């Protein structure tokens, strides 16, 4: 199949949508399909990173005046243009396609219908927001999500829901057996802090300040120079011998395996942590993370903490996490086995048949 991805990364969007699309893309390429990414260049984009993965990239028009979202759920602004202009730009550059995979909160069912009719192609949508769609296949990997929550314009639409379809790189399922052998926290508890590639509200710094007064721990914080508060985090870490700051890791799975607990946002990394049984404190930093955080916390796999509760409640949450570490770990393992991406690819290939 000739498969086209439509997704963006930016200072407002973050990198999660692109990263999970790349997981799918690499498996599809290994299965012999042709893959191209269509993305809009803007501040914080991942154009160069996608190219570094040896995947073809087509850049859509760069907007003259960048639009700043009014809130973290202002998804129309994420597209930086109208859905119709975006669709026409995409169609003009696409040529022909068998399947278009869309992972973008700013793209709606009108875009999907228009592109599908214009290119005579099938549409696969990756979503987390329970929106209406005009698609042949829909994926929502949110833990606890139910198929009947989605409304579609096509009665034959196949809907995949739940963390059994979580889009994880193959390395996570491969390392899972090794992770299952660990039965206790190390003497110097190893803590991994990953609040996302952007972390606009600078929750990373708040977390590091809370961790700095907890004894007998070693902290690794992962934060990219793309993040607007990179400098403040970097400066804080310089004077903290128990904290190591790294800009980037191309092997996050092994990094997670080396740590005992994690502090992170409940985005795509939630499934990575779960697959490797990594107990965590999850701190939502965007509206679209609310359902994930609630469901994982209710399952007993993590402790949910609001941003405003970090200062008064972090130490108690951390103690509860380490005191009940094995219980949290077992419940994480139950969420996903890490093979979801292969299940999704199987469904994609059924569309062709």
Image (cartoon, grey):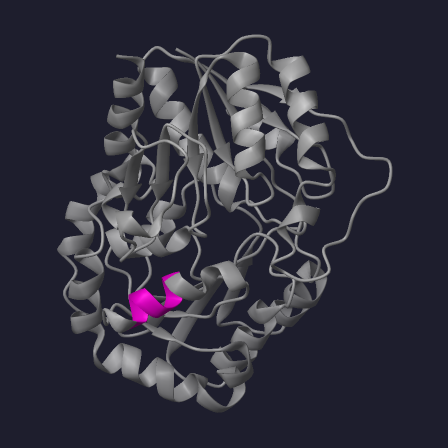
**Extreme residue in the right direction:** 64
Residue at x-position 19% and y-position 57%: 333
Closer to the camera, 312 or 148?
Answer: 148
Q: Is residue 77 magenta?
A: no
Q: Main secondary structure of the magenta part?
A: helix
Which image quadrant is residue 261 in?
A: bottom left
User: Is residue 162 shown to the viewer in this render?
Assistant: no
Residue 275: percent from left, percent from top? 25, 51
Write the residue at 27% across / 58% down. Answer: 144
Q: Toward the viewer: 121 or 343?
A: 121
Give the quarter of the figure containing the C terminus: top left
Q: Is residue 332 visible?
A: yes
Q: Is the residue 285 above or below the residue 211 in the image? A: above
Residue 120 percent location from the top left of the image: 49, 12
**Up-down relation of residue 50 to residue 297 (above or below):** above
Toward the bottom, the furthest residue is 312
Which stretch did the figure color magenta? 292-297
Quarter-wise, where is residue 342 in the image?
top left
Q: Nearer the viewer, residue 193 or 312?
A: 312
Task: Give how far across and how far down residue 324 sits, in percent.
Answer: 21, 79
Q: At 45% across and 33% down in the image, what residue appears?
A: 134
Q: Compared with residue 276, is residue 310 higher up or lower down, i.e. above or below?
A: below
Q: Quadrant of the N terminus?
A: top left
């Amino acid at each position: 199949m000739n498969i086209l991805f439509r997704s963006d990364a930016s200072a407002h969007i973050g990198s999660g949508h692109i990263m999970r699309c790349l997981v799918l893309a690499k498996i599809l390429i290994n299965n012999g399909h042709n893959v191209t990414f269509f993305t809009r260049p803007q501040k914080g984009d991942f154009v160069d990173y996608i190219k570094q993965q040896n995947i073809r990239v087509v850049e859509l028009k760069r907007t003259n005046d960048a639009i700043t979202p009014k809130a973290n759920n202002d998804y129309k602004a994420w597209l930086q243009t109208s859905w119709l202009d975006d669709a026409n730009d995409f169609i003009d550059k696409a040529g022909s396609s068998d399947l278009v995979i869309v992972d973008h909160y700013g793209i709606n069912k009108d875009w999907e219908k228009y592109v599908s009719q214009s290119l005579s192609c099938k549409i696969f949508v990756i979503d987390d927001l329970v929106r209406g769609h005009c698609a042949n296949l829909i994926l929502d990997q949110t833990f606890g999500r139910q198929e009947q929550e989605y409304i579609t314009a096509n009665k034959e639409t196949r809907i995949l829901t739940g963390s059994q379809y979580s889009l994880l790189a193959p390395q996570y399922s491969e390392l899972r057996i090794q992770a299952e052998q660990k039965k206790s926290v190390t003497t110097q508890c190893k803590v991994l802090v990953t609040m996302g590639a952007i972390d606009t509200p600078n929750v990373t710094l708040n977390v590091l300040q809370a961790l700095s007064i907890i004894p007998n721990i070693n902290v690794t914080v992962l934060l990219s120079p793309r993040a607007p508060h990179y400098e403040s985090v970097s400066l804080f870490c310089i004077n903290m011998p128990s904290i190591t700051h790294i800009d980037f890791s191309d092997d996050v799975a092994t990094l997670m395996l080396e740590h005992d607990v994690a502090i992170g946002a409940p985005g795509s990394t939630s499934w990575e942590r779960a697959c490797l049984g990594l107990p965590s404190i999850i701190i939502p930093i965007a509206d679209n993370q609310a359902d994930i955080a609630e469901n994982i916390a209710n399952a007993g796999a993590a402790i949910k903490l609001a941003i405003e509760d970090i200062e008064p409640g972090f130490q108690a949450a951390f103690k509860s996490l380490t005191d009940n570490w094995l219980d949290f770990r077992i419940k994480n393992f139950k969420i996903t086995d890490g093979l979801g991406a292969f299940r999704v690819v199987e469904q994609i290939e059924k569309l062709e048949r």
